[in-house]
Amino acid sequence: MKFLSFFRHSKVIVLTLFCIVTVCGVFPGCYSFTGASVPSHLKTLEIATAEDKSGFGVAIFRQSLTELLLDKFRRDNSFELVRERPDARLTPTIVSITEEVALVTSGELEDKRKVTVRVQVVYDDLVKHKQVWSKTPEQFEVYNVSEGIEGRNNAVRLALERVADDILLAVVSGW
């Protein structure tokens, strides 16, 4: 009799687990961060060409950041991107790009370097004539010293891509 009691309880447990798994599997697809905190009066956005005040000396990084932001906001589709008469404006400035030793091998030879990128970005509401926020996201990437300048530049590009993700997230979800 106790054996049948176990099966009766196990059916309840199995049914409960099935319901939990079903709910967890279905509802995440119904929720999205996109557009969660974009005010309804902001429909268009201008992304200003990024400035580079880092002193790092590689001009292509400001263009890379601008293109990354444009691409991410186009894909997100929370705003229509415009150049004239926007409702909101993002103004990014690369503040610093720094390098430091990340790993030294046993023979005291430098093996990996860490590149850190900081970007100041201002988000303005041009309809209400006020600054929504000003943030300075920072990201880093590690590269092998053996990859040289190409490895360093690729590491900066990857860090800039993550900064662009942070900026998009801050705009569309208020983080």
Image (cartoon, rainbow, N blue to C red):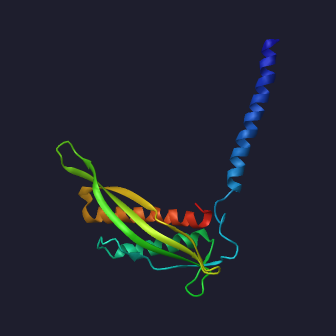
Q: Position of residue 66 (x, y in %)?
A: 46, 75
Q: Identify the residue at horizontal 33%, vertical 76% (top origin).
A: 59
Q: How many marks?
A: 0
Q: Position of residue 153 (x, y in %)?
A: 32, 66
In-front residue for pair 111/4:
111
Q: Quadrant of residue 174?
A: bottom right
In-front residue for pair 174/101:
174
Q: Identify the residue at horizontal 51%, vertical 74% (top origin).
A: 70
Q: Is residue 18 left or right of residue 127?
A: right
Q: Position of residue 57 (x, y in %)?
A: 29, 73
Up-down: is 34 above or below 52?
A: above
Q: Quadrant of residue 106?
A: top left
Q: Identify the residue at horizontal 66%, vertical 77% (top origin).
A: 43
Q: Is residue 18 left or right of residue 45?
A: right
Q: Is residue 149 left or right of residue 13?
A: left
In-front residue for pair 129/161:
129
The residue at the far front in this view is 130
Q: Identify the residue at horizontal 51%, vertical 72% (top origin).
A: 122
The residue at the far bottom in this view is 84
Q: Is residue 149 left or right of residue 124?
A: left
- Give the quarter of the figure containing the N terminus: top right
Q: Position of residue 25 (x, y in %)?
A: 69, 46
The residue at the far left in this view is 107
- Give the quarter of the figure containing the C terminus: bottom right
